[in-house]
Amino acid sequence: MTTPRKGGKGASGSSPELGDISDRLKDLSGRIEAEKKEHTEAERPSTSMGDATGYAKGYRLVSEFVAGTLVGGLVGYGIDWLFGTLPFGLIIFLLLGFGAGILNMARAGNRVPPAQERLDANRPRPAALDDDDEED
C-alpha cells in the first residue's frame, strides 16, 4: 500500500487540487439549492384575500371586453342612423366589437402578443452556409 506524498499524487491518482475543487462544487451546489428554495418561496402566491391584484386584473379584463363591445355597437348604430339600415350595421359592428373586445382582453391578459411580435417570431432564420456548400 502506498501512502500519498504531500503535494504529490495520491493512490487514486488525484491531486489535492481536485479535492479542493470537489469541496467547492459541493458548497456551490448547496448554495444554489438554498437560493432556489428561497426563490420559489418568494414567488409563491399569497393565500390571503387581501391581495387585490387578481381583482384589479379581472376588472381590467372586463373593462377591455365591455369597451370593445360598446364601441362596436355605437359605431354600428351610428352607421345605421346615417344610412337608414337599422339592424344590419348594428349587428355587424356589434359582432366586430365583440371580437375586438375578446382580442383586447387576451392581449391585456398577456395571452396573445401584439401583431408585430407575432410576425417577428414567425420569420425564418437565415440559412447557415457550410464550408462544403461554397464552391469557388
Image (cartoon, helix red, strand yellow):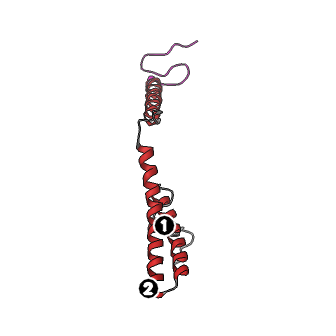
Q: Gap between marks 1 and 2, in whole Å?
A: 20 Å
Q: Residue furthest bottom?
A: 83
**Image coordinates for residue 117, horizontal then vertical, percent:** 45, 65
Which numbered disc, 1 or 2, marks the residue that appears first in the sequence?
1
* Mark nearer the viewer, 1 or 2: 2
Label 2 crowd bin: few (<14), some (14–19), many (20+), radius 10 Å: few
Image height check: is 134 above or below 112?
below
Q: Nearer the viewer, residue 95 or 110?
A: 95
Q: Secondary structure at mark 1?
A: helix
Which residue occupies 55% across, 79% down? 87
Question: Quick check: can you spot residue 128?
Answer: no
Q: Mark 2 = which residue?
A: 82
Q: Nearer the viewer, residue 57 or 131?
A: 57
Q: Residue at x 57, y 69 (%)?
A: 132
Residue visible at 48% across and 59% down? Answer: 105
Question: Camera-side residue: 47 or 112?
Answer: 47
| Up/down of 110 relative to 48, above or below | below
Q: Amino acid at mark 2?
A: Leu
Mark 1 sits on what residue?
69
Q: Is residue 42 left or right of residue 89?
A: left
Badge 1: residue crowd in 10 Å (few <14, some 14–19, many ≥20): many
Image quarter for residue 28? top left
Give the main secondary structure of the magenta stretch.
loop
The magenta stretch is 1-16
Residue 91 location (% of width, % of height): 55, 75
Q: Amino acid at mark 1?
A: Thr
Where disc 2 sits, the SS reads helix
Cβ–Cβ under 8 Å for marks 1 and 2: no
Which quadrant of the rendered structure holds the N terminus?
top right
In reply to whether residue 10 is colored magenta, the answer given is: yes
